[in-house]
Image (spheres, grey):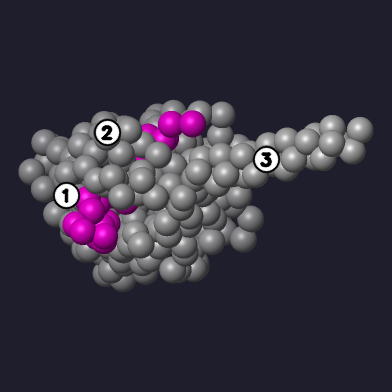
Amino acid sequence: MIKKTFLGLLALSLFAVSCSSDDDSNASTTSNLTLNFQGLEALGSDYVYEGWIIVDGQPVSTGTFSSVTFPQTFPVNSVQLENATTFVLSIEPAVDPDPAPAATKLLAGNFSGNVASVNSDNIVVALGSSLSALGASTGKYILATPTDMDDTNEASGVWFLDNTNAPSVVAGLSLPTLADGWKYEGWVVFDGTPISTGTFTDAESADDNAVTSIFKGDSGNGPGYPGEDYLQNAPTGLTFPTDLKGRTVVISVEPYPDNSTAPFTLKPLAHVVPSDAMNHTVINMGDGPVETLSGSVTRN
């Protein structure tokens, strides 16, 4: 009996050692991936940032985050991290049923040794979009309110068009074509409050709220270019019609679907409407405050 008990305990002991050894050998070894980005802003509550490494042409998640305080470090499978060629940062739903990266890929860069220099320009190299040309964007606009019959409030509307050679009218914005997952949006900043003029992908066509805008007048949708008349239904604290002189006009790049009602970080064009601006006369925009985002990704 003693002999059988001893043999039984010995067998259990050997099994335990064997299982422990197998677990150790099969355990995934991880290495650190450190992200250090400049210029990122917090997203809306329903969205998060997600990092990805490209391994053998396939995306592998490195984890999600919502804080924009850097550096941040994530544990990643050592073999996959060593074999990664590219890093990509995307914007994802906080509750995401799709394991693949969303179309809203913001930063990308190829590894050189253990470091990848990433920025929004490099997306054209890594993923085939056109965000890299944002720095070459130019813009023109006029003050006018074509959606009502009142000619006394012309400084209450902004339209991104060029009527220099009137009656011929052309697009006022020269912008690169964005990749899937992104749209442009116009804004006017009223005493620190940005009010959208509408989202669009084509500067030579009306924007997405041409028909649905609650601010325009009752005489039509306006010209076939992005823009807005601020004539009625003013948000709380504002009065329409108004005078846009002294206000800031902005063009931003927005995730689509959008994560927030506020402007996104990327703003390639901006301009303060001059106090002596003339109605129906072309005004040139300048560079915006953020034309590109950048940072570094280090594996060790």
Q: Residue at x 89, y 38 (%)?
A: 2
- Is residue 293 part of the magenta span, yes or no? no
Write down the residue under mark 1.
Answer: 133
- CA separation in Å, label 2 and label 1: 25 Å
- The amino acid beneath tag 1 is Ala
Left or right of 81 on screen, residue 97: right
Residue 217 percent across, percent down from the top left? 46, 38
Q: CA distance from mark 3 to mark 2?
A: 43 Å
For discs 2 and 1, the disc positioned in front in the rendered view: 2
Residue 220, image x, y percentages:
40, 29
Indicate which label's residue lies in the foreground, 1 or 3. 3
Residue span colored magenta: 99-119
SS for callout 1: helix
Q: Nearer the viewer, residue 241 or 117?
A: 117
Residue under label 2: 57
Name the residue type under label 3.
Leu
Q: CA distance from mark 1 to mark 3?
A: 64 Å
Whether residue 116 sits left or right of residue 12 in the image: it is: left
Left or right: residue 170 compared with residue 87: left
| Mark 1 or 3, nearer chain start | 3
Quarter of the rendering occupied by the C terminus: bottom left
Query: Is 283 placed above or below 260 here?
Result: below
